[in-house]
Amino acid sequence: MLAAIIAAVVFLTLALQTTLNLERDGSPFAAFALLMRYFTIWTNFAAGLILAWIAWRGRIDERVIFALATAITIVGAVYHLLLSAEHHPVGADWWTNLMFHSVLPVATVLWWLAFSRPSEMGWRSIPWVMVVPVIYTIFAQIVGAATGFYPYFFVDLPKLGWVMLLVNLLGLSVVFMLIAAALLGLRRLVVRAFARQVRSSPRP
């Protein structure tokens, strides 16, 4: 049920942001397509799809939701640590910004902490999170080649060249793996704390 609620909020927020951009972008399709150039939107949309699938089917490979939790943690952390001081949206844009960078990342990670199956995850799961930056980099290159627009400086191939692009991709992969390791450690602490609480609870 909670997965369905989070997914619904994702899709409603995406619909609102698409509507807000109609005057600038001209059509719903164009507005949504232009939004999808950004990793923040890409990751939130993935959260909506994955959690909707879980709500419908009840199960997904733990590595998929683990990679999602890592990616959306980075979305929230990068925004609040590096971008929020210079970004001041107003009106409905303030609300969608709050959803994409704060509420939905926190809700997704809390869902993962509460409902993932720790027995199916270990340190060997960490390399799976590298799939996310690799896929997004390929996506950004396809979009950039077609439109000339690169949403982030670290994927701007014409300015960087292939060597620097690959260095940036390696750096991103390392960051993803470090965040993934921290999340996995946190997940184990939560499981242990819950187990201790269960053992210490009085039995009827």
Image: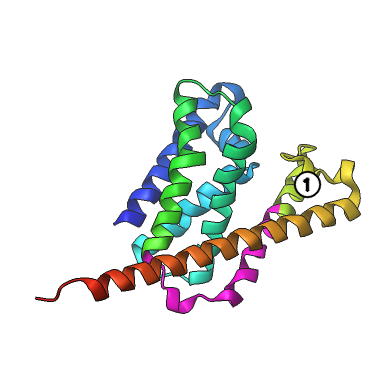
Instruction: Residue at 64%, 61% (x, y): give it.
Output: 178
Q: Residue 42: x and y, percent?
A: 58, 47
The residue at 65%/42% (across/down) is 37
* Relative to 138, 181 lies left or right: left
**In x, y percent, where is residue 191?**
39, 70
Is 52 drawn above or below residue 61 in the view shown?
above
Q: Quadrant of the N terminus?
A: bottom left
Span shown in magenta = 115-136
Left-right relation of 7 to 32: left
Going 44% across and 30% down the picture, which residue do you hit? 95
- Residue 126's quadrant in the figure? bottom right
Vertical order, 109 against 23 (above or below): below
Given residues 32 and 182, the one toward you in this image is 182
Under circle 1, the secondary element is: helix
**Residue 11: quadrant of the picture:** top left
The residue lying toward the viewer, choosing from 73 and 191, is: 191
Is 118 inside the magenta-drawn segment? yes
Q: Amino acid at mark 1?
A: Val
Question: In the displayed image of the protein, which residue is found farthest to the left?
Answer: 204
Quarter placement of the C terminus: bottom left
**Residue appearing at x 59%, y 65% in the figure:** 181
- In the picture of the structure, the residue carrying the numbered disc 1 is 155
Residue 8 drawn at (x, y percent): 37, 46
* Residue 53 visible within the image: no
- Residue 77 seen by the camera: yes
Quarter of the view holding residue 192 = bottom left
